Image (cartoon, rainbow, N blue to C red):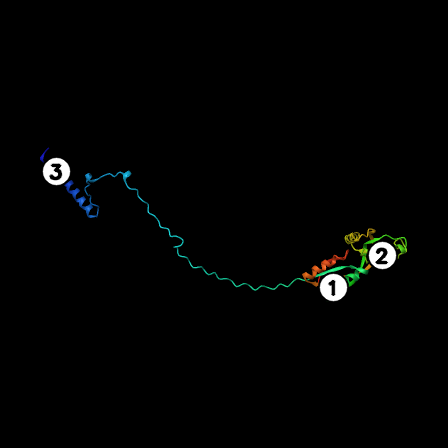
Amino acid sequence: MTKSIKWIFWLLIAANVIFFAVMQLSVNGQGAPELYPVHEEKITLRDLSESEPVQAPTLEVASPESMPVSAPVAVPVAASAPVALVAKELACFEWGDFSGGELVRAEAALKKLKLGDKFTQHEVDRNINFWVYIAPLKDKAAANQKIAQLKARGVTDYFVMQEPAEWLNAISLGVFRSRESAQKFLEDMHAKNVSSAQMGERSSKTRATLFMINNLDADMSAKLTLLQKNFSGSELKPASCH
């Protein structure tokens, strides 16, 4: 190797050394961490099986007695609305039909209720379709004997037929607008042991009395309903108030 080549070779090595030194100084000047020597002879490995157990941190929970009690929250109470007074509903009825002795008895019963001017009565024309009767007897004496039996059994409303035809000396016990009313009355007669009473159709025009009872409260309406049961064959039904 010639002297010029050797000189160039050593010049390149010197340049690399200088360049490497400059780079190290530049990096350390920017705050890069310094490298410290590691002493291997001072490093020891610890056996984890012989180490003490690590206790987890405990959290203290406050007991309910120690917790602060919040003050009750006052809830505003709305003032109660005024209660409206509701008027009691009044009822009105139509009760009928009546004639003869039953009419007198019904008038007396209504007066006992002390209704004052709350009831009125008026006559109406009816086309009677059904009646309860005792078949014609052979003569007037037999009819009088049957009437005595009726009175003994509590039957006071009757009428002896005076027609000279087929109904002569028959005894009418009641006339009705409907079959249901006639049937109910017939059952009442049988309950009184009037076994000869029977029901039939009878188309005839007659006059009857009808009661109008107005403005009854619940208590008086109940009393009237109970009273109606004492008059077999009569009909009590709601009506418009006047």
Q: What amino acid is at disc 2?
A: Ala
Depth check, front residue: 38 or 92 = 92
Q: Badge 2: how crowded within 10 Å, few (<14), some, or many (20+)?
A: few
Please tell me which of labels 3 and 2 falls first in the chain. Answer: 3
- The residue to which callout 3 is attached is 10
Please tell me which of labels 1 and 3 falls first in the chain. Answer: 3
Q: What amino acid is at disc 1?
A: Lys
- The residue to which callout 2 is attached is 148
Q: Position of residue 144 (x, y in %)?
A: 87, 56
Q: Secondary structure at mark 3?
A: helix
Depth check, front residue: 64 or 57 = 64
Q: Nearer the viewer, mark 3 or mark 2?
A: 2
Depth check, front residue: 7 or 205 = 205
Q: Is residue 182 left or right of residue 59?
A: right
- Residue 105 placement: quadrant: bottom right
Q: Is residue 223 left or right of residue 169?
A: left
Q: Which mark is residue 112?
A: 1
Give the spatial CA distance, label 1 vs label 3. 153 Å
Q: Is residue 165 above or below residue 8?
A: below
Q: Is residue 236 above or below residue 116?
A: above
Q: Nearer the viewer, mark 1 or mark 3?
A: 1
Q: Secondary structure at mark 1?
A: helix
Q: Position of residue 13 (x, y in %)?
A: 14, 38
Q: Position of residue 215 (x, y in %)?
A: 70, 63
Looking at the figure, which quarter contains the C terminus?
bottom right
Q: Residue at x 71, y 60 (%)?
A: 223
